Image (cartoon, grey):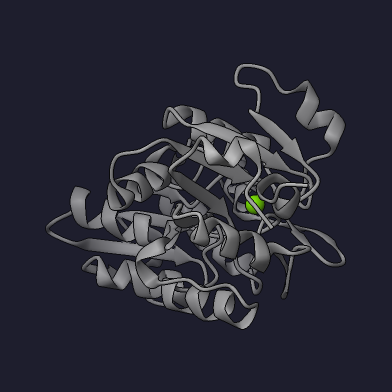
């Protein structure tokens, strides 16, 4: 097995996870083989995800469990980026109301913020962090709306409307951000794709070279890569159809493939 001609022209490959490397708890067809082939061709790899339901360590474990070799330094999560942004913009700390998984709570706490969920300060937090998670409750939307209307900054982990799961699309962070924006008439600051920061963090770790981003979303992956000045390829194992991918212009993807293996492997 060899590398496809397209991939030989790049030094680095930045892989989206949901809908590209895996769907739910299963890798996409021959994804482990595709990643192994990239490694044997000496390509540098980063895994970049807007999914914030897990920590970087948990993503590494999941990749290994699917037969894909990965290291923590290769995983760039939006949770890590949120932590970086909070620590950077609020060196004195402050209070945060968090909508998100345990992993997001940990990242916000590690940024030096005091988390005020469940306290009297909830509706007066300095920042509301918004990240999709599976146990969303009306109470979270209510507290967040009140805090934002009282002046809290809204920091979102992305605008993805959905993410692919085996039984169909599930609502993602963007759907929750949209609910809060609608309720408050305020606009969230977005840290995840299509903001270029996740790609730039990955490039910073990988060093100089020509990079290709691969993902399943036009709005997050293709637009985010373009914002970072990178080429992008779209795979059809997630939320985008071939017709939608072919209709994308400015930027247009450099390639459209049935799946990651079809993009990466020759023949
Ligand atoms: Mg994806």
Residue 15, percent from left and from top: 55, 52
Residue 1, percent from left and from top: 69, 58
Residue 172 location, quadrant: bottom right
Residue 148, percent from left and from top: 43, 48
Observer able to see residue 150: no
Q: Identify which residue is drawn at 41% across, 47% down.
A: 198
Residue 196, percent from left and from top: 42, 37
Please state if 245 lies on the left or on the right of 140 as rendered: right
Nearest to the observer: residue 151 or residue 78: 78
Please state if 10 lies on the left or on the right of 81 as rendered: right
Residue reaching furthest to the front:
1
Nearest to the observer: residue 190 or residue 120: 190
Q: Identify which residue is drawn at 66% across, 72% down.
A: 134
Please state if 69 lies on the left or on the right of 112 as rendered: right
Nearest to the observer: residue 252 or residue 161: 252
Q: Identify which residue is drawn at 70% across, 45% down.
A: 263
Residue reaching furthest to the top:
250
Residue reaching furthest to the left:
92
Q: Identify which residue is drawn at 78% across, 22% down.
A: 247
Please state if 76 lies on the left or on the right of 28 as rendered: left
Residue 42 location, quadrant: bottom left
Nearest to the observer: residue 261 or residue 193: 261
């Amino acid at each position: 097995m060899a590398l496809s001609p397209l991939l030989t022209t790049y030094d680095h490959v930045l892989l989206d996870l949901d809908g590209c490397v895996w769907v739910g708890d299963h890798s996409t067809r021959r994804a482990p083989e595709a990643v192994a082939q990239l490694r044997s061709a000496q390509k540098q790899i980063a895994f970049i995800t807007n999914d914030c339901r897990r920590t970087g360590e948990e993503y590494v474990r999941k990749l290994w469990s699917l037969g894909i070799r990965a290291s923590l330094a290769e995983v760039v999560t939006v949770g890590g980026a949120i932590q970086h942004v909070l620590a950077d913009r609020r060196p004195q700390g402050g209070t945060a109301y968090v909508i998100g998984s345990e992993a997001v709570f940990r990242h916000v706490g590690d940024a030096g913020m005091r988390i005020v969920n469940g306290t009297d300060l909830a509706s007066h937090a300095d920042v509301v962090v918004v990240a999709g998670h599976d146990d969303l409750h009306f109470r979270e939307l209510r507290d967040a709306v009140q805090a934002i209307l009282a002046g809290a900054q809204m920091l979102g982990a992305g605008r993805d409307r959905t993410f692919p799961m085996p039984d169909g699309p599930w609502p993602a962070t963007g759907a929750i951000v949209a609910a809060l924006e609608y309720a408050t008439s305020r606009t969230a600051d977005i840290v995840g794709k299509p903001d270029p920061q996740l790609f730039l963090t990955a490039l910073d770790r990988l060093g100089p070279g020509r990079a290709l981003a691969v993902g399943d979303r036009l709005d997050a992956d293709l637009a985010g890569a373009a914002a970072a000045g990178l080429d992008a390829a779209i795979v059809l194992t997630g939320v985008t159809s071939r017709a939608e991918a072919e209709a994308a212009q400015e930027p247009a993807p450099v390639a459209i493939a049935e799946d990651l293996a079809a993009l990466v492997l020759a023949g």
